[in-house]
Amino acid sequence: MAKKSGSTTTPEQRHEQIRTFVLPNKESFTVQWKHGKKEIGNRVHEIGKDLFSQFTAKGVGSVTLVSILTGGLVFTADLIRALNDEHLNEHPPVSGEEHKSSAPRNVEEDKPHGELPRHIMVHLEFIKAKKYEGNTPKELQLNPDLLDNTKIMGQHIILVDDVVDTGETLRGANDLLRARKAASVTPVVLLLKRDRQQKAYGIKIDPAERRIVGIGDEEFAEDFSGHIGFVVGPEFLVGNGMDYKGALRNLSWIGAETQPRASRKGISVRLKDRSRKIS
């Protein structure tokens, strides 16, 4: 028997859907679905696993995550919870299962390459960046006042941002952290816009491997190369922490603006088939 469609069906399970949001100022904003909640979560988990392996292989026991606010906050919160050794358990226990038996956990099953998994201490710091008014690019402003320099100097830094457009923000934050004598800076971005002018700011990428391989004059060693969640088009993006004039930041999925400014009358959101491949 075919399942009846109903309110319990999630947007990612529907083939196509159009929804309308109304802002207080009645401005319209059309968004095309790009990446869903599950897809984002899976990719963040992959990045966290790769970062954990990168740093533990080097014997690094402490890192500092520097989040570029405000758009990078949601991605940072997800990434920090993925930066652990939980991926080493092939069948992790469900909530409460570990309390059902008094038998000790068999840590031998968790050993990578014959060694016990290591824990990484994670410090959290912030840089405030302002680049857009609405969806219009403005002069970049970086505010490092929230940084605790004792968590930067001599430390291995994971620099986290939501999206790389021209690369100006990422380059500016990287140079700031280098000037404060960080031991290393590994950039991690959720989204990178293809066909933009990242080269003008020295952002060197390997789109096939979804890696950032250098910034400025520096070429990253393979074990400290940066990570890219998804390579996307040049459109203005919202959702998963990214906003338009404070709106749509709390969407659990990511969408791209499609509707011309002149034709706006409400906020329409178009969710496309989740099977669509975004390279």
Image: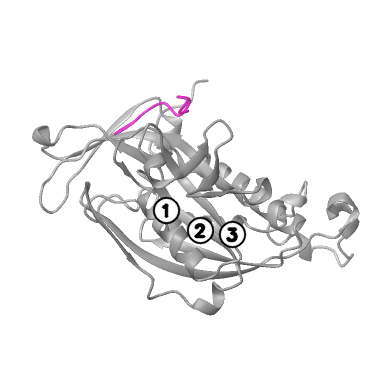
* Few, some or many residues within 10 Å of mark 2 (<14, 14–19, 20+): many
Measure the alpha-carbon separation of dots 2 and 3. Answer: 15 Å
Residue that carries the numbered disc 2 in the rendered image: 159
Disc ID at residue 59: none
In the depicted structure, whether residue 178 falls above or below residue 3:
below
The kind of secondary structure element at disc 3 is helix
- What number is the disc on residue 81? 3
Q: Earlier in the sequence, mark 2 or mark 1?
A: 2
Q: Can residue 187 be seen by looking at this rendering?
A: yes
Horizontal side of residue 136 vs 58, given as left or right? left
* Residue 106 visible in the picture: no
Q: Which of marks 1 and 3 precedes in the sequence?
A: 3
Q: Is residue 247 rendered to the left or right of residue 277?
A: left
Residue stretch in magenta = 270-279
For marks 2 and 1, give the CA distance.
8 Å
Q: Position of residue 158 (x, y in %)?
A: 55, 59
Disc 3 or disc 1, which is closer to the eye? Answer: 1
Proximity of marks 2 and 1: CB atoms separated by less than 8 Å: yes
Q: Which one is nearer the viewer's eye here, 132 or 267?
A: 132
Magenta run includes residue 58: no
